[in-house]
Amino acid sequence: MWKLALLCAISGTLFLTPKVNTCNEAVCGSIVSKCLLTQSCKCELKNCTCCKECFNCLSYLYDECCSCVDLCPQPHEIDETLLSKKSHVEDFKEPVPGLFDALTQVPDAQNRWNITRMPINIDLSHYGPKGHVKVVMQSGDQPGLLPIESHNIITLNCTVVFMKGCRTWHKCRSNCESMGSNSYRWFHDGCCECIGQHCINYGINESKCRECSMNQDEEEDDDDDEGDYGQDSDNALNL
């Protein structure tokens, strides 16, 4: 009789106490009752003096049943601000600079992307068989910049395109390749950046896409030609 009363008390403690993580009664009921009877899981997570014993007791069901004994670590929440700082970059084997330049000469009539240009100064005096190219990037609207005085300096424009909405990694790659860009940068928050031929270090390492955040679903492409901005090529990926 006392064993029955003890089992009822354990069951009440196990299944009637509200928990952050749901306890699966059907899967965990039997083994958790056994571990509670042997007091193998009688401790708190902060000191966890019984964690090893409880892990052995719950055995292969520990991951699924640790919530029943309040010994599951709290799940880690994703910080969306960190996703916008992480990115994947890749070069295209056969870019088409002429096509990319033509598409980015003026703002897109359909407002599908935002164009950003940055001047890049290259010091040709450092270019040679044993030398290196010295490249200086500066923002066009950055105040207090002094002109670089050298007859060997040439200035080129780095042009990048930030897509308006979010893209998957595959769709970002496909869109940028269809535009003829030299490379692309896909941010983990879904922002897509297509990069022109004169850029270094894969353009701008900052997510600047309009209407793209983790709280928004990826925009559906209603127009058949949204993914292809030039003529088809063997290397362009179809959406």
Image (tube, rainbow, N blue to C red):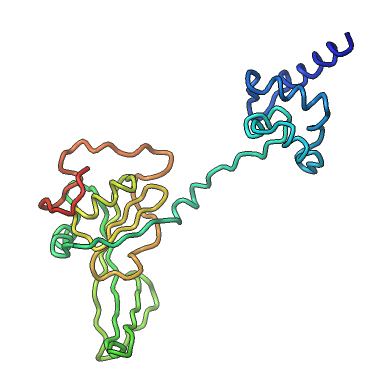
Percent of width and height locating residue 238: 19, 45
Decide: is 206 above or below 121: above
- At 31% from the left edge and 83% from the top edge, which residue is drawn? 133
Seen as rendered, the residue at the extreme left is 231
Percent of width and height locating residue 46: 77, 42
Residue 12: quarter of image = top right
Decide: is 71 above or below 148: above
**Nearest to the observer: residue 128 or residue 26:** 26
Residue 127: quarter of image = bottom left
Q: Report how many numbered discs are placed on residues in the image.
A: 0
Percent of width and height locating residue 53: 78, 37
Q: Give left or right: position of 148 versus 221.
A: right
**Nearest to the observer: residue 57 or residue 184:** 57
Decide: is 35 above or below 168: above
Decide: is 140 above or below 124: above
Percent of width and height locating residue 75: 61, 39
Residue 89: quarter of image = bottom left
Quadrant in which the N terminus appears:
top right
Q: Give left or right: position of 200 versus 79.
A: left
Seen as rendered, the residue at the extreme top is 1
Quadrant in which the C terminus appears:
top left
**Nearest to the observer: residue 236 or residue 204:** 236
Q: Give left or right: position of 20 versus 155.
A: right
**Nearest to the observer: residue 60 or residue 101:** 60
